[in-house]
């Protein structure tokens, strides 16, 4: 039973919360109550009429944003809120409320999923899958909305495998793949979302551009943004992030760095950049001192070419990126005009004319969105196709029409080892700019310090702060456990052959095609 407005209670945050986290929790709980979700009593209540609301929870690395998001998700689920994951959506019920946890990139979403939060990309919420009716019955059963079905061509054992998979990992496509189905069997297309949802949480919201924000506002009457004000703003926003446009009363600031972050030399270095008295030379001394007392920070003379295969070296300048990629490919013996299995790629967008909008949606919904990290597995079964592993995607293996471009130093035009007429476009991913690294995290991160020194010498600022400091902060905070600060323009020889044995395999890879441009 819902409480009268006059007697509403303040939501109680877990005692492990700091004061600023508890305050943010209570503010979010207040707006959720208006959406018909009472976190205090773990119940659903009638919706209170009112305007759409947007809140932002902002704080630097280690301030507890993700912890707060995860706690709110857990309490919303306990209250009976339907969790929307983007892979399947049952019939909406008037008496229910919905929550979607979103991130701008596959990698950022996968970071949350590893922490028990079923996050998906913004694109997967904007577009919903169209299921074949007979397999939709399986999805409804898995989601607890229908009885166990009988499906022609699927044995009881196959259904048991699907159920066991779904109970362990709540992914409908993954469960259907475990039953032996291919994506093309059960997903027939994608459509733009027409019906709104209720509550949206957006992690890494510093990466949001205005168009994405406007799209989300149309879907979610209640939107909570989680972001880091010290990161780099999206191109075109002049150093200002979306949550900077909100009034101060709608920005909840987490200022305390939590106990779990104490003694972390990587975060110590990141937060030291806020001190205006620290210049580049002083900061490098701090890196050297941190490396002397803790092996989680290392000052190294060369870029590790083995590490570049799965964790790109982070740079500022595009010219540096191209030189390092060229050196990486030469060190691993990649042919000048070809690819070898295990080479990393970055999706650079979808090259399709407007008349093929449906296929664009299909490619993007499978994870091939701009900025996605991909590992090349080999040529596809058709000309212009490539077998790919999409890093961070729930169903990572796809075969897609691909346009792969390998840039070379001092050459205007890249060479193209794989060229479909149209499809997903890729650049090499052994080195990436710090701007494109936002939203991603890796176990170990290499930061190419000569580029940061170049930014320091340039004397540029962004939103009132030296650009080199913003770059350094973003680059450093991509490291989950180990930071390599590379001080020289050198590349170490690889110690092992490039391969794909380390990549997770899936039972039923998706095949993504594009129509002939003449049809």
Image (cartoon, rainbow, N blue to C red):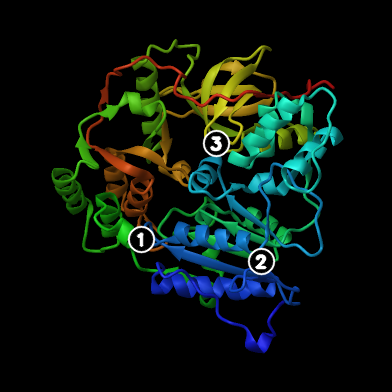
Q: Does the rendering let one see residue 41?
A: yes
Labels 3 and 2 touching (C-beta < 8 A): no
Neighbour tally class for label 2: few under 14, some 14-19, many 20 plus, Cα within 10 Å: many
- Cα distance, mark 3 to mark 2? 28 Å
- Which residue is drawn at the image coordinates 48% and 62% (left, top)? 68
Q: Position of residue 81 (x, y in %)?
A: 68, 60
Q: Residue at x 37, y 68 (%)?
A: 255
* Mark 3 or 1: the one toward you: 3
Q: Residue 294 bears which disc, if any?
A: none
In the figure, is residue 461 to the left or right of 118? left
Instruction: Tell whether 114 sits left or right of 125.
Output: left
Q: Which residue is mark 3?
A: 372
Within the image, what quadrant is residue 311 found in? top left
Q: Which mark is residue 465?
A: 1
The Cα atoms of the two marked residues, 2 and 1, are separated by 32 Å
* Residue 222 - label: 2
Tell me if 228 is positioned left or right of 367 in this view. left
Q: Position of residue 121 (x, y in %)?
A: 61, 46
Classed neighbour count for the residue bearing mark 3: other residues with Cα under 10 Å, few (<14), some (14–19), many (≥20): many
Report x, y in % for residue 272: 26, 58
């Amino acid at each position: 039973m819902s409480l009268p407005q006059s007697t509403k209670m303040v939501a109680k945050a877990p005692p492990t919360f700091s004061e600023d986290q508890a305050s943010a929790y209570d503010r979010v709980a207040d707006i959720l109550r208006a959406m018909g979700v009472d976190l205090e009593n773990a119940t659903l209540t009638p919706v209170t009429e009112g305007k759409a609301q947007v809140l932002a929870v902002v704080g630097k690395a280690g301030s507890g944003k993700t912890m707060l998001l995860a706690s709110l998700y857990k309490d919303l689920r306990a209250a009976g809120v339907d969790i929307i994951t983007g892979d399947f959506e049952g019939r909406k019920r008037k008496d229910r409320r919905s929550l979607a946890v979103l991130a701008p990139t596959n990698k950022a979403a996968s970071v949350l999923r590893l922490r028990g939060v079923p996050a998906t990309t913004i694109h997967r919420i904007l577009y919903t899958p169209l299921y074949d009716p007979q397999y939709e019955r399986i999805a409804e059963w898995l989601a607890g909305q229908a009885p166990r079905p009988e499906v022609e061509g699927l044995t009881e054992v196959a259904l048991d495998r699907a159920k066991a998979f779904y109970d362990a990992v709540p992914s409908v496509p993954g469960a259907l793949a475990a039953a032996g189905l291919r994506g093309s069997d059960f997903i027939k297309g994608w459509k733009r979302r027409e019906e709104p949802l209720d509550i949206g949480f957006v992690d890494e919201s510093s990466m949001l551009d205005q168009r994405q924000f406007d799209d989300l506002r149309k879907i979610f009457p209640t939107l909570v943004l989680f972001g880091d004000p010290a990161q780099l703003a999206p191109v075109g926003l002049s150093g200002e992030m979306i949550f900077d446009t909100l009034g101060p009363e709608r920005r909840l600031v987490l200022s305390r760095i939590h106990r779990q972050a104490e003694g972390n030399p990587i975060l110590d270095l990141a937060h030291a950049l806020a001190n205006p008295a620290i210049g580049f030379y002083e900061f490098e001394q701090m890196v050297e001192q941190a490396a002397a007392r803790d092996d989680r920070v290392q000052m190294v003379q060369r870029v590790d070419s083995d590490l570049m295969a799965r964790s790109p070296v982070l740079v500022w300048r595009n010219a540096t990126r191209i030189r390092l990629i060229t050196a990486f490919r030469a060190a691993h013996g990649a042919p000048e005009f070809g690819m070898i299995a295990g080479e990393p790629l970055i999706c650079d967008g979808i090259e399709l004319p407007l008349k093929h909008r449906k296929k664009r949606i299909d490619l993007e919904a499978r994870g091939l969105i701009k900025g996605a990290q991909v590992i090349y597995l080999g040529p596809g079964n058709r000309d212009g196709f490539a077998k790919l592993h999409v890093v961070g995607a729930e169903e990572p293996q796809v075969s897609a029409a691909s346009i792969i471009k390998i840039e070379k130093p001092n050459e205007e035009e890249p060479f193209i080892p794989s060229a479909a007429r149209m499809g997903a476009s890729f650049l090499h991913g052994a080195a990436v700019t710090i701007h494109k690294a936002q939203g991603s995290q890796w176990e170990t991160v290499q930061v190419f310090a000569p580029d940061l020194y170049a930014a320091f010498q340039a004397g540029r600022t962004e939103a009132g702060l030296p650009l080199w400091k913003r770059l350094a902060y973003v680059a450093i905070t991509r490291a989950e456990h180990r930071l390599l600060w590379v001080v020289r323009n050198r590349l170490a020889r690889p110690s092992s052959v490039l391969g794909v044995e380390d990549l997770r395999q899936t039972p039923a890879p998706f095949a993504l095609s594009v129509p002939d441009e003449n049809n």
